[in-house]
Image (tube, rainbow, N blue to C red):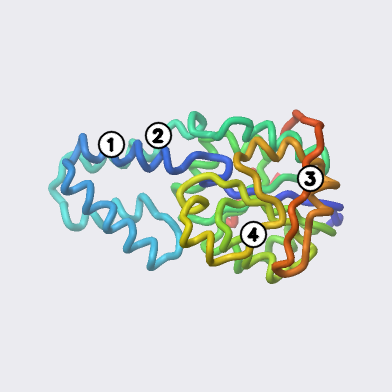
């Protein structure tokens, strides 16, 4: 297997796709179908399951809710709402442009975590799977699978784009200067002061995913620092445009 000069690893939820908006739509749908009190119970179960698994499992929480409400007639409509949700409408502006821009310099890989049904469905229906030519990796805990990531996509350098500083920090601790961490300040995790205060800044911070268009691959690579010694990179004036599905849960080319 060839070794690439650079590989770009990009998260999905609140990085390329506005998952907070998806959750808000689900909240409204649940209120309409099962009422406000039962909607609250669903989210309680959702948070319990997230703590157990370490990732968001919308369908798993729905199954637990079903065990408590076996005769609830609207449950199947909630399930179909999730499965048939128009995820492509929730991509952040310029998400696909960023993928096309980065592909000019190396492979772009979706690096996500989640369940084995809903998360792949989201990546597929959003159009992200097609955009990255099937380079999709979905793990239970992606930060613990770096050896597998490196085996599947060998590279001299990696650029990791993720809305969670914890993930960026954990991977930086393992790969050091071999990875450039990019933090798009999108979604509730990225704007939670308590969470942000726990971790050092990423190598590069942008307010929106579309701002990555201002950076060349060389600039992103040069921004990498060891450990927590991070200093911001300066964007170029150039913009871009072009395009590039696997899952550990993966399908290969």
Distance Cα–Cα, label 3 vs label 4: 15 Å
Query: Which residue in the protein does label 2 denote?
Result: 84
Distance Cα–Cα, label 4 vs label 1: 35 Å
Q: Earlier in the sequence, mark 2 or mark 3?
A: 2
Q: Quadrant of residue 30?
A: top left
Q: Quadrant of residue 160?
A: bottom right
Badge 1 density bin: few <14, some 14–19, many ≥20, Cα 10 Å: few
Distance Cα–Cα, label 3 vs label 1: 41 Å
* Residue 250, image x, y percentages: 61, 51
Horizontal side, residue 58 vs residue 244: left or right: left
Q: Secondary structure at mark 1?
A: helix
Q: Earlier in the sequence, mark 4 or mark 1?
A: 1
Query: Does residue 21 appear in the picture of this structure?
Result: yes
What quarter of the picture does the N terminus occupy?
bottom right
Q: Which mark is residue 28?
A: 1
Q: Nearer the viewer, residue 135 or 205?
A: 205
Q: Secondary structure at mark 3?
A: loop
Q: Tell me whether circle 3 and circle 4 mark residues in contact (CB < 8 Å).
A: no
* Residue 128, image x, y percentages: 60, 38
Horizontal side, residue 244 vs residue 199: left or right: right
Query: Does residue 136 appear in the picture of this structure?
Result: no
In this picture, is 11 found above or below 27? below
Q: Earlier in the sequence, mark 2 or mark 1?
A: 1
* Residue 205, image x, y percentages: 66, 49
Q: Secondary structure at mark 4?
A: loop
Query: Which residue in the protein does label 3 denote?
Result: 234
Q: Quadrant of residue 64?
A: bottom left
Taking the view exactly as shown, the residue that stands out farthest to the left is 71
Query: Which residue in the protein does label 4 denote?
Result: 201
Distance Cα–Cα, label 2 vs label 1: 16 Å
Q: Earlier in the sequence, mark 4 or mark 2?
A: 2
Badge 2 density bin: few <14, some 14–19, many ≥20, Cα 10 Å: few
């Amino acid at each position: 297997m060839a070794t690439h000069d650079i590989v770009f690893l990009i998260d999905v939820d609140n990085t390329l796709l506005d998952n907070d908006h998806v959750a808000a739509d689900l909240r409204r749908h649940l209120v309409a179908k099962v009422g406000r009190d039962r909607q609250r119970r669903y989210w309680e179960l959702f948070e319990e399951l997230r703590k157990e698994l370490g990732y968001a499992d919308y369908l798993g929480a729905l199954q637990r809710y079903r065990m408590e409400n076996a005769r609830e007639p609207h449950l199947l409509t909630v399930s179909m709402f999730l499965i048939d949700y128009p995820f492509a409408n929730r991509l952040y502006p310029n998400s696909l442009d960023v993928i096309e821009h980065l592909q000019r310099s190396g492979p772009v890989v979706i690096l996500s975590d989640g369940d084995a049904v809903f998360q792949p469905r989201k990546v597929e229906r959003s159009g992200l799977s097609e955009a990255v030519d099937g380079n999709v990796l979905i793990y239970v805990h992606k930060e613990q699978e770096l050896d597998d990531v490196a085996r599947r996509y060998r590279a001299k350098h990696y650029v990791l784009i993720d809305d969670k500083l914890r993930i960026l920090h954990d991977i930086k601790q393992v790969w050091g200067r071999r990875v450039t961490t990019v933090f798009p300040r999108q979604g509730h995790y990225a704007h939670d002061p308590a969470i942000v205060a726990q971790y050092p800044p990423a190598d590069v911070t942008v307010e929106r995913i579309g701002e990555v268009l201002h950076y060349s691959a060389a600039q992103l690579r040069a921004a990498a620092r060891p450990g927590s010694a991070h200093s911001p990179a300066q964007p170029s004036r150039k913009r871009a445009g072009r395009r590039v599905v696997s899952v550990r849960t993966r399908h290969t080319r």
